[in-house]
Structure formats: structure tokens, C-alpha cells
Amino acid sequence: MNFDDTPQEAEFRSIARKWIQANAPKEFEEELSKSSLGRIKLAKHDMVEVGKAWQKQKSDGGWACLHWPKEYGGRGATPIERVIWQQEEGVYGKLTQPFQIGEGMCGPTVMAWGSEEAKRRYLPKLASGEEIWCQLFSEPSAGSDVAGLRTRAEKKGDNWVVNGQKIWTSGAHYSDYGLLIARTDPNVPKHKGLTMFFLDMKSPGVEVRPIKQANGMQEFNEVYFTDVVIPDSQRLGAVGEGWSVSLTTLMNERMSIGSRLATGVPEMFEFCSNLMLEDGLAIDDPAVRSKLAGWAVKASGLKYTSYRAISALSKGERPGPENSIGKLVSGMMLQDIATYAMDLEGAAGSLTGESEEVARGQFQQMLLSSPSMRIAGGTDEILRNIIAERVLGLPGDIRVDKDVPYNKIPTKGR
Amino acid sequence: MNFDFSDEQKQMRDEARKFLSEQCPPRAVREVLDGKAPYDKALWKGLAEMGFLGVAIPEKFGGAGAGHLELCVIAEEMGRALAPVPFSSTVYLAAEALLIAGSDAQKQKWLPRIASGDAIGTLALFEGKGNPSPKAIKLTANGGALNGVKKPVPDGAIADFAVVAARTGSAGRESDVSLFIVDLKAAGVEVKPLTNIDLTRGQAEIAFKDAKAEPLGAAGEGWGVITQVLDRAAVLTAFEQVGGADRALEMGRDYALDRIAFGRPIGSFQAVKHMLADMYVSATLARSNCYYGAWALSTNAGELPEAAAAARISATQAFQHCAKNNIQVHGGMGFTWEFDCHMYYRRANAVALGLGSLSYWEDALIDRMRKKNAA
């Protein structure tokens, strides 16, 4: 048991480190280090533009989408090399946020189901960040039950005509292409009538509208489709096979290991170390210490769980299911930490200004944003179902709509 | 990075699991639970023969000379099987104290007997309510004679010798504590078994009246040794706790698959599934913290104090959580004497206190994290 690299890994790390030192946009290092909890603030620059520049530079140097084959814009690297790269990329990795859905979900789906021509046309530009991709799965009445989606695609000659609405699409407003799942046959049970496509987000009839979220911010979009035409050549997988294709996408989402989830623990530790309460520092209060210790061991547990997954990769094994707990644990923890930090601030805890009383407002922001952490990318409840069914082997829920044609499933809005 | 046990260590785990499933099935645990024997003597001998008692004891002192990673592996299996033997008191506490502070002669006298299963040892630290603290030690040592009362002493009623913490100064400071080895069969030692919630592991009160004692380590350095022993024992015990937590989770999962209610396995109800998923989460977090503790223990790293506290807290929470919800999954059957759920529940809650309670370790973790942050 050790934390050491193998000789090959050490060599790869040293090459990666040297390249990053020579090429990284150091002018943004400080701002990137300070931005926490997934929120990147660059005072004078557009984050997407800075990100695109870094992504292009990496691509030119052979450091983009490392685990992809070279002919599709990758490096043909091993999974462990990808993890090492992410460790070395450090704060600059935050700049990859606009490309993560493309690299993690859309790209692998195109790679698994696209034609050779499509792969050569789209994947290298996705890898280099010249073209950004988004994922169009969720709908207002199809969230956890995504197979219940309503967006229709109807065959007209060699094309498909799409009408409907998607929601919670991150980055739709700056994306060039989208991965779209739509209903092509409403007369069969819901999982069987779906088909996967990709489309140009600039197509006529595509309208992107930002959503004003519960936390007051606008990070996600609604996307409306009115008679949008998609050529049949942009279909991925067979007609009616969309559900299987979507599983490729979702499995890839869950395989991402290097991505460190924010837990809020370092922020909370620092806060409690400096907050003066009536009887002294918060961190000297036994009640505070008990809470803090409970969170600290969850954060360290997550960290070492990811180390176990990395070790499996290093040995060329497939990581076990342990890593599926990350978002479930960290989402709840962020919310609990924010609530408790504000409790310690007392009456001033409700203030949101960046005043001295409230530690720059970070916990107030965390409180308002944290509900989304427990919903996006699989709700806490869906994640518990996944652990129970796929890890512990418990039976699936009884599905009352399983063998019912989609258009006979009772819904409130139809 | 290789943050995992080696193939040889995993093989040892398989051997230990096989041995314990044959030699320590629940009905063997119940012999002790039902008060028919103070501990499982045959199992104790068997563990010695397998080389498990001396796995981390150097060969020159009669052990297998493997190491602490191997001991972690064995500890997990002991916890999983609820082995009703004085393993933790003898191996994690007494043997580790000897390894840290013992003279060559002391090691030569006791360690081979531990490895061969001929001597049971323990640590006599507590004197009634409260957590480990130099202030709480009132038992005195004068001219090699101990006077005072220790309780609870784990496995005190069956132990042959004890490492005893005594006050040798007047102020209750760390430097006022010294350690002694006492032969518990000698004159001046009075042992009284105590009842406790975990019926598979005994506790005792030991009164010392001018009992003859031999110093272990230098005078005034006892507290430092105790701290080290507790850190090591915290990691090893955490592995026992993770073993117990995993077993409780499995029992709950198996029952949820087997039990039919409302015309379907209860494991298909989300209320039950989610409870089991949460048990898996806490057991996984604990296991990962334990692995870090094992690394720190086996390399004697500077990170050990923090890693030990994190492993201890995480594993305590996981075992309590899994043992409690295992009963809940079982419903009424889980509250019968006949089902094994209560044995895990008892163990989970007793072992949570033995080295100092959860709040003691939470406090320790924060102190240690601050120290690291300041450095």
C-alpha cells in the first residue's frame, strides 16, 4: 500500500508537468485558485473564451481528451494517465468546465454509435474545444423518468422533424452541437420508442432561453424545438434504440473519476477557525468540533474512495462501484454545512452581502445553490436506487408503465 | 498509486475468513453470549496456530513478523465474525504497548506467549466514567507497588497480565503518568467481572492493593505511549468495525431479498432500498478512511494521529449505523434473541466506547487537523 507512481506513471507525470508549466495561462492562476464550489469568476475575461484558448492549446500539444484515440483528437492515453493529467492540470482544470459534457458524455456516445465519417468530422473539433456540445435529455415532465420524454421526431423523407422542449441544458447558449433524444414512436412502451440524434444548435427552429433559477442565477437553459429539421445521417443507433444509446452516455458520466467534487469542508474549517463567538473561537466549541469532525471524515472518506478507484485504474482494472457515492455524499454535505455556518453567524447569517459579518457571503450562496447539487445528474433518490439495485443487487421497483404503449400512460398534462 | 492491499494480504484475508466461518460461526459466538464460557478457548488456540495472534509481532519474539497491514486484514475478519476472544485487548493494546515501550527482556517474556495463545493481556487505563485523560488517572505507584482501582478493563477477568497506567507525579499532567506491567495472578490484585452490553466480550474491575508492578518504559513517559497505543488500536479497531458494518449490511440486504410482504420482496420498496444504500455509503466511507489509517500505521507516518482519528470516527459511525438499521430492515424478527442482529448492535455500541467515545475522537481529530494546518 503506497501512494507512489509506477516508473511509467512517474515519467508521464513529469512530461505533463513540464508541458503545463511551459504553457498554462498563468495570468489566471490566482483567480482560478480563489474560485470555489464550481463557480469560476474571471474579472475581466469571458470564461468560455479563456477556456477555449486553453483547450485549443492543449489540443495542439496533444493533451486534449487524453483517453481518446489519436485519430479522433485524443492522445490514446490510459485511464490512469488521464487521472494523472487531471491532477497535474490542477486549477487550470477549472477552465475545462464548458467542454466536460462534450468530452464526458456526447463524445463517447458519438464514438460508440456514430459513423466513421461522423467521428472524423466531429470528434477532433469537440476535443480541441473549437466546437462545444450540450446534452438535450431532460424535459419539464421527464426528469428522473427521462424515458417518459415527449419531444417528438417524425420522419419526413430523408429528414426528421423535431418539435418539443428540453430543459436544464447547461451551456446550450454557447454550444454548437447538441445530443438529442426524442420520441419517434408513441405507440410502443416508453423505452422502445426513442431515438438518438445530434444536431446543429444553430438550426432554424431551435430557441435557447435561459432559466432563472431558484438561487437567482442563470446557468441552465430551456431549449425549444419548432419544426427543426435533422438529417437522418445525424441519427445515432437504430430507430427505437435511443434508450440503449442513452445508457452509453449515462455510464460515461458515472465513470468520471478524477473530477473532484466540492464538499465545503475546507471552507468550513477555515471559517470555524476564524469565527469569534461570545465564548471564543467557534472551533473551540465542542458542538462545532463534533459537526466539523463528522464532515471532515466524510470528505476524507470520499478522497480515499477516489484513491481506491485510481489504484484500480493503475492496475488496469475497472474501478468498483464505490465511486458512485461521491455526489450523493457531497451534495447533502454542502447543504448541511451552509445551514450550520449561517446558524453560527446568528441573526446576521441571513445577510447575503459580501460583508465581514458573513464570511464573504459564501455560505449563503452555498445554501441557495446546494439544492441543485442534490438534483442535477441524478437526484439523491435515483442515486440511492442505483446503489441499491446495481451494487447491492436489490430488485428494481415495480413499473406500472413498463408494458403500456407510451400514448396510453396516464399523465397530468395530456 | 497502489492504495490497496496486496494479493498476498488479500489471500490472508480469504484464509482468515474461511477459518473464522468454520471455527467461529454464530452458534460459537452464542456460547459466550449465553454465558456458557467467558471466551472461546478453542478458537483462541486455533488463531494462535494460524499465526494470527502474532502476525505483527517480530519473528525474534515468536511472531510471524508480517506487519500491521496484515494485522488490519485479520482485524476486519475478526470484527466480521464477532469473534468472542480477547484479540483486541491482547493484540492491539498489550502487545502494541510492549512493542512500543517494552525492554528486550519484557518483550521476550510476553510477546512469544501472546503469539502462542498462552498469555492474554490487556490495558488498564480507565477509572470509571470519562475518556482518556492524564487527569483521570488516580491509581498510584510507589516503590513498584500499585494502589487503586481500574474499570472498565477489557477482558480483565480472563487476562494474565495488564499494562497499567499509574500516576507517578502529583499534578495530573501528561508527565505524571507512567506505565507498569502487572501479573494479574499475583497477590494484591482483585478482579471482578462486570456486565456490559456486549455479552461476547468481557469487562472487569481490577483493584490493586500494594500489587507488585514492573515499570514499562521510562517514568513520566507513560502518556506518550498510551497516545501511540490508542492511535494504533484506533486503526485496528476501525477495521473490526468496518468488518462488522459490512456483515450487518449483508445481513440486511439478504433479508430484504428473502422476506416477502405485500406480495413482493421488501427489498423492492424504496424506503428499505434507500436505508440499505445509506448503509453502503457509510460503510464505504469508513473503509476508505481505514485504508488511509492502515497506510499511516504500517509506515509509522507522521499522519497517523489524524488518520487514526478519522478512521475511528468514520468506522464507529458506520458500524453503529449499519447495526441499527440492520435491525430495522429485519423488523420484529430483528428484535428477537434468536436472530443475530442484536449481537452486531451490541458489539457496535460497545466497541464505540472502548478506546474513548466518539466525542473524544472528534475532539482529537479537530486538534490534530489544526496542528497540521498550522504547520
Image (tube, helix red, strand yellow):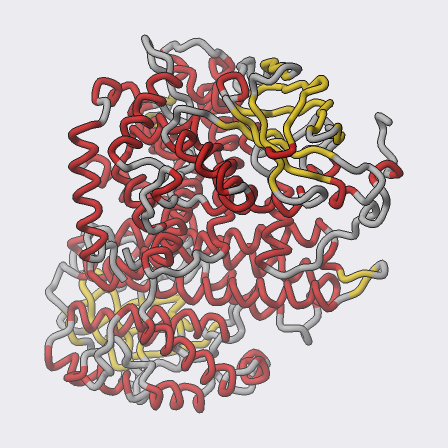
Answer above or below: position of A38 versus B57.
above
Q: Residue at x 42, y 20 (%)?
A: A362
Image quadrant where residue B291 sits:
bottom left
Query: Residue A372, position in %: x, y?
Result: 56, 28
Whether residue B130 is visible: no
In the rendered view, does A137 fall on the left or right side of B11?
Answer: right
- Disc tally is 0
Q: Residue furthest front?
A: A157
Left or right: A269 in relation to A391: left
Q: Nearer the viewer, residue A25 or A340?
A: A25
Image quadrant in which the N terminus of chain A is located: bottom left
For the point 35% across and 28% down, which residue is it? A94
Quarter of the image with the C terminus of chain A is top right
**Residue B332 seen in this snapshot:** yes
Q: Is residue A170 left or right of residue A149?
A: left
Q: Is residue B342 above or below residue A7?
A: below
Measured as percent of width and height from the top left, residue B133 is found at 29, 53
Q: Which of the 4 image quarters holds residue B34? A: bottom right
Nearer the observer, A80 or B264: A80
Residue A363 x %, y %? 45, 22
Q: Residue at x 32, y 87 (%)?
A: B117
Nearest the eye: A389 or A9: A9
Residue A237: image x %, image y %? 62, 44
* Residue at the image point whose x is 40% and y is 61% from the top: A317
